[in-house]
Amino acid sequence: METIAVLLIKKLGLMDLALFIKKNNTLKAYSMAKTSQVQLIKKLLPQAFNKITFLLDSEKTKDNILVKSLKEKVVKLTYNLYDLALPLIPKLTTKIIIQLSGFKSGLIIFLIDKDESLGVIVFTKNYKDNFSQDQEILFAFARNITKTIINTQKYQNLLNQIKDFKI
């Protein structure tokens, strides 16, 4: 999936994409594309990217756009990186990331199976855009990510059942 993500980034002129998956009552950072720019930004984070976790029922995260998109099951557009980062990434760090990356716009697509929210995927650009020309391919990519998450969960459940059976 990483290779497809990098190709998508290059083809559409995206800055990056990041995946956040719902686990219990949290929204956990799962992966970012491995572009050279992203590797630099990851070094600025106060913790490893895959350790970033938003509590879904916390007063501190209620205004975070990722949490809102997941809970409301609504696609969100932002021109402000603070909407994505706060409260987990300090304002000063976010400001430096904005300066280094040139972040100008982000599209958040919620991932859903039936009526269950599974997570969100974030696409970013270093120019102001409403993503209207890219939405069809980005939504198709999000649907494929959703299928991958579902299949991974089914596979994990099967492994757990086999493990329980052996005991």
Image (tube, grey):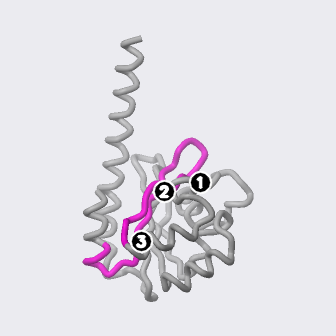
The answer to whether mark 2 and mark 3 are in CB contact below 8 A is no
Q: Earlier in the sequence, mark 2 or mark 3?
A: 2
Q: Disc 2 designates what residue?
A: 20
**Disc 2 and disc 1: Cα gap in Å?**
9 Å
Mark 3 or 1: the one toward you:
1
Would you call the spot at circle 2 few (<14 residues within 10 Å), some (14-19), or many (20 or more)?
many
Magenta stretch in the rendered image:
9-35
Q: Mark 2 is on which residue type? A: Phe
Q: Mark 1 is on which residue type? A: Thr
Q: Earlier in the sequence, mark 2 or mark 1?
A: 2
**Left or right of residue 85, residue 114 in this image:** left
The answer to whether mark 2 and mark 1 are in CB contact below 8 A is no
Q: Quadrant of the C terminus?
A: top left
Q: Earlier in the sequence, mark 3 or mark 1?
A: 1
**Left or right of residue 164, residue 46 in this image:** right
**Left or right of residue 56, residue 76 in this image:** left
Q: What number is the disc on residue 105?
A: none
**Disc 3 and disc 1: Cα gap in Å?**
18 Å
Position of residue 46 measured from the top left corner of the image (x, y, whole percent): 63, 64
Along the line of sight, the residue nearer the viewer: 5 or 51: 51
Image vertical order of residue 10 relative to residue 154, above or below: below
Position of residue 43 measured from the top left corner of the image (x, y, whole percent): 53, 68
Would you call the spot at circle 3 few (<14 residues within 10 Å), some (14-19), or many (20 or more)?
many
Along the line of sight, the residue nearer the viewer: 165 or 42: 42
17 inside magenta stretch: yes
Image vertical order of residue 41 relative to residue 1, above or below: below
Residue at left 33%, top 66%?
139
